[in-house]
Image (cartoon, helix red, strand yellow):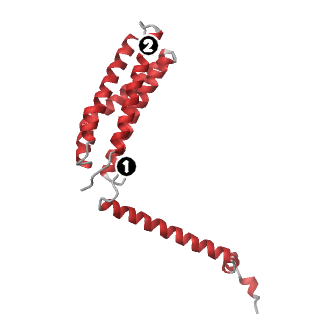
Amino acid sequence: MVDKSQNETRVDILLGIFQNNKLTAILILVGIVVITFAKVTESGDSILRTFGIIKSYNVDQATDRGKFSSQLIENAWNRMFWMRVYTERIRLNANSDDQNVAYQKYIDATEKWSSNIMNYYLGLEQYYPKTDKRNLLEGTIQPEFIEAAKMIQTLKLSADTLKFEIKIIKVDSIQYIVDNINRDFYLLIDQSVDMK
């Protein structure tokens, strides 16, 4: 006759330890409760959003609206980032190569933003109806972008001939406008959304 302990595999031994351990049973039970709670919460949130009880700026990548929103946010922040980098390199009196790299990245970000601006206007109307998002972008944020762009262009073209103190004043003015754009953009993405 074969001894029972010789036929047990490591898996059988491990299962035996778990079967006889109250802590393991409690951990498994807690895990089941946590997972169930997470699924119920996720479903409840989805139901509340579907019926318009919870209203928010949607950046869920699974939806067209989410993709649109993510692209809008990414392109705006990219443009503001390179505006700040370029002007800060002027302030720090960085070498011309570093300034030119930052300026070119700013131009690239501006081109991407500008080539999509009409899509942003229309997308805000389509995906966020009954809000003032399009008006905020078109009437406030875009004019601020244009004003800052003109100032950056003037700074770029005259940087070699300006006194350093004047450059700093221009840089401060540009960064003030970019800070305003940033604040206004937060208003754009934080506006409540009427899903009806």
Work out which residue is located at the far bottom of the displayed protein and give it: 1
Q: Measure the C-alpha gap from mark 1 to mark 2.
A: 39 Å
Q: Position of residue 36 (x, y in %)?
A: 48, 70
Asked if residue 119 can be seen in this view, the reply is no
Q: Which mark is residue 181?
A: none
Q: Residue at point 23% right, 45% down? A: 125
Circle 2 packing at 10 Å, graded few (<14), some (14-19), many (20+), is many
Residue 91 vs 62, above or below: the answer is: above
Q: Residue at point 44% right, 23% down? A: 86
Asked which quadrant contains residue 22, the reply is bottom right
Q: What residue type is labelled 2?
A: Lys
Of residues 34 and 24, the one drawn nearer to the viewer in this rendering: 34
Task: Name the quadrant of the N terminus.
Answer: bottom right
Q: Given this view, does label 1 or label 2 mark the residue nearer the observer?
A: 2
Residue 79 vs 99, above or below: the answer is: below
Q: What residue type is labelled 1?
A: Val
Q: Earlier in the sequence, mark 1 or mark 2?
A: 1
Q: Which mark is residue 59?
A: 1
Residues at marks 1 and 2 touching, judged by CB atoms closer than 8 Å: no
Asked which quadrant contains residue 54, the reply is bottom left
Give the residue pinned by disc 2: 167
Q: Position of residue 107 (x, y in %)?
A: 36, 25
Circle 1 packing at 10 Å, graded few (<14), some (14-19), many (20+), is some
